[in-house]
Amino acid sequence: MPLYVQIGTQFATVMGGAVIVGLVGTAYSSGWSTLTYGLLTMLGFIPFLFMAKWLRNSEFETMPDIITKIYGRHPVLSVLVILSTLIVPFGWMITQLVGFGKIFSTITGVDAPLMVAAFAVISLAFVLPAGMTSVAWTDFIFGCAMAVGAVVAFFMAMDMGDGFQTIMSNTPSEISDFPSGLAGVGMGTILFWIFGVMPGNLTNQQLYQRIYSADNSRNATISIGVTAVLFALATFWSSTIGLTVRSLNPSLDNAENATGWFLTQTPDWFLIMFAVFIVATIMSTLSSAVQSVVVTITKDIYTNYVNPDIEEKKLISVSRIVSVAVLALAVSMAIFFPQALGWIVASFAYSVSALLVPILGGFILRDKNILDHRAGIASIVMGIGGSGIAHFLGADIYVIYGLAASLVGLAIVAAFNKAKERQHEIRKSDSRAYRNS
């Protein structure tokens, strides 16, 4: 993909229901904390700047390809990585469906579950024709629509709220003052974002796929940097929209209904235009998530373990069936658990617990000859186990326990392998000395 498409599809991927529904809701209740979320996410892109060249030039296709390259091929490790890889894109699928349902049920009065199901059917048209190709180019087109829609919405919100100063004066100072409002959501939540959300994109296969598909490694690196800045700007937009709604209507029952309420107060022409912006934003992220889940299931599970000799044409048919199946499951989850930002945060937390240490640790130690499949397995299992146990016991920042356990698992096996390698070198040295004598 050329650079402009690369940037467009990456930006469209990280946008979506979390930004226009979940983070607007966070701004409504906690003010500039939404910008804190964006800045932390932007910082989380930094390791990609160092890894992009290696990732692009390695000709990877999915996340398990990275782990296999570093730790070697092993069925147990492959299954663990595949399951861990599916966490984020599947959570993102549900988030987009929840976001669409909440906004358009408020606008139209139609029940949210019906809107979710209808949108899921429509979205299949964007991912079924040509997989990553159709997703990337529609992302680019939708990204342009997002930029236009966001700018117009920003000035519309400023006009409705009688200007920035009036909006700030009509909202509680603890969330609207700057910079103190950056911590309006509370330090406990911010710590969770630091350990769970900030590194979350490093375990997001959707972004890796876009690095793989860049036309060269230089453009892969540039696109990551530009996307990070654009996402921070997008969360500034979410902050202003959320604070505007808070100043106009401080008594909403559900903060995540802020975007929908905002639209009902605008002229018809703007409502229609912004509805197109919303569809573009959510559709691009949903189609990216569906494509990411499907390619993992079809390539890393079906092709590798079920039907290795399948022809490409037949595999495309299988991928379309899988697309329908996973989207149907996501619709069910979105209807029964309708929390937009909650799905994003939880999926990032568990994905980070499982994959962050194996990816970053593996990248750093990849040439040291101390990593094998046992190190990868230990790190993933202990990461998931640490987070799961801490979450079950009621820990608020459970992802920290998962990361610590994952690091311990990797370190123990790596140290064992290093000691074993040292003993092997000593035996070889003694053998040479014996022969020489």
Image (cartoon, helix red, strand yellow):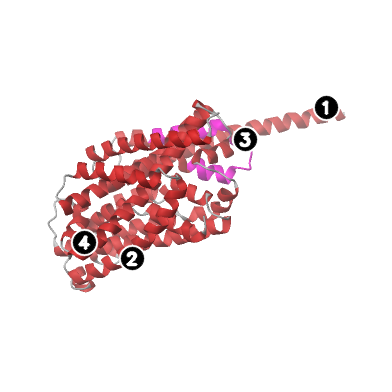
Q: Which residue shows up at 55% across the image and 54% down it?
A: 50
Q: Nearer the viewer, residue 227 or 174?
A: 227
- Which mark is on residue 301? none
Position of residue 164 relative to residue 39, above or below, is: below
Whole-number angstrom distance, CA of label 2 to CA of label 3: 55 Å
Q: What are the residue bounds of the magenta stretch? A: 357-386
Whole-number angstrom distance, CA of label 1 to CA of label 3: 24 Å
Q: Nearer the viewer, residue 107 or 426?
A: 107
- State which quadrant residue 91 falls in: top left
- Image location of residue 300, percent across then percent down: 49, 34
Whole-number angstrom distance, CA of label 4 to CA of label 1: 85 Å
Q: Which residue is mark 2?
A: 148
- Which mark is on residue 418? 3
- Image location of residue 321, percent across then percent down: 39, 34
Instruction: Say whether marks 1 and 2 touch (CB < 8 Å).
Output: no
Q: Nearer the viewer, mark 2 or mark 3?
A: 2
In terms of sequence position, does the residue under pointer 2 or pointer 3 come before the other? 2
| Amino acid at pointer 1 | Tyr
Asked if one can make out residue 318 in the rendered structure from this viewpoint, the answer is yes
Position of residue 101 relative to residue 49, above or below, is: above
Looking at the image, the residue that sits furthest to the right is 437
In terms of sequence position, does the residue under pointer 2 or pointer 4 come before the other? 2
- Which mark is on residue 434? 1
Q: Nearer the viewer, mark 4 or mark 1?
A: 4
Q: Which residue is mark 4?
A: 271
Residue at disc 2, secondary structure: helix
Asked if one can make out residue 352 in the rendered structure from this viewpoint, the answer is no
